[in-house]
Amino acid sequence: MEEMFDVLNEWGEFTGEIASREECHNKGLWHRAIYAFIINKSGEVLLQKRSKTKKLWPDMWDVPTGGHVLAGEFGREALIRETKEELGIDVLDNEIKYLVGSTSVNEKGDIINKHFNECYVITKDIDISTIKLQEEEVSEIKYFSKEEVLRRIDNNYDGMTDKTGPWNFLKKILEKM
């Protein structure tokens, strides 16, 4: 079944229209997305490696969980759903902290992503050896030290997606830790 999204205007207001993922990406329609950083109690950051078959940023390290907000869905609901779908991890509401909202525009090939993003932090210790990944989305997950993540960000996002907004938010989080 095709995913359907609420269409927003350039100010983030709901237009009352609903469009498919394909239509949003082909026409460059504004829609909502979420992502979250997962940080354990030791300060390590969980990242996911995107599947080699992904259209955008294949085989690159990315935020551990993220995706689109479905029509009629709240961001927190989307975050809990996406984390379960992609990583098989159940997240409780008290483990989630809303951090910041932002916009992003990404054009890669024939895909035009215009997002109103919600960024979250999930504080949770996860035994990654027990995780069952959604293989068409994620090929690997791994904990990285604060120093390794900061080094990669400072080294032109070494091996990571070029989603500069999320990485800059993560850098701010890690610098405050």
Image (tube, grey):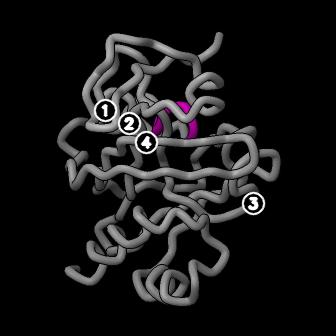
User: Between disc 3 and disc 1, whose residue precedes?
Assistant: 3
Badges 4 and 2: C-beta atoms under 8 Å apart? no
User: Between disc 1 and disc 4, whose residue precedes?
Assistant: 1
State how far apart marks 3 and 1 are (Cα): 26 Å
140 sits to left or right of 85: right
Q: Is residue 115 above or below residue 142?
A: above
Badges 3 and 4: C-beta atoms under 8 Å apart? no
The magenta stretch is: 82-86
Is 124 magenta? The answer is no
Badge 4 marks a residue whose secondary structure is: strand
User: Between disc 3 and disc 4, whose residue precedes?
Assistant: 3
Q: In the picture, residue 173 is in which quadrant?
A: bottom left
Q: Could you tell me which residue is drawn at 48 percent across and 63 percent down? A: 46
91 sits to left or right of 29: left
Closer to us: mark 3 or mark 4?
A: 4
Badges 2 and 1: C-beta atoms under 8 Å apart? yes
Q: Could you tell me which residue is drawn at 51 percent across and 69 percent down? A: 143
Badge 2 marks a residue whose secondary structure is: helix
Mark 4: few/some/many CA within 10 Å (<14, 14-19, 20+)? many
Badge 3 marks a residue whose secondary structure is: loop
Question: Which residue is denoted by mark 1 in the rendering?
Answer: 75
Mark 4 residue type: His
State how far apart marks 2 and 1 are (Cα): 6 Å
Badges 2 and 3: C-beta atoms under 8 Å apart? no
State how far apart marks 1 and 4 are (Cα): 13 Å
State how far apart marks 2 and 3 are (Cα): 22 Å
* Image location of residue 165, percent across then percent down: 41, 64
Question: Which residue is denoted by mark 2 in the rendering?
Answer: 79
Question: Which residue is denoted by mark 4 in the rendering?
Answer: 115
Is most of the magenta stretch helix, strand or loop? helix
* Image location of residue 18, percent across then percent down: 45, 12
Q: Which mark is residue 59?
A: 3
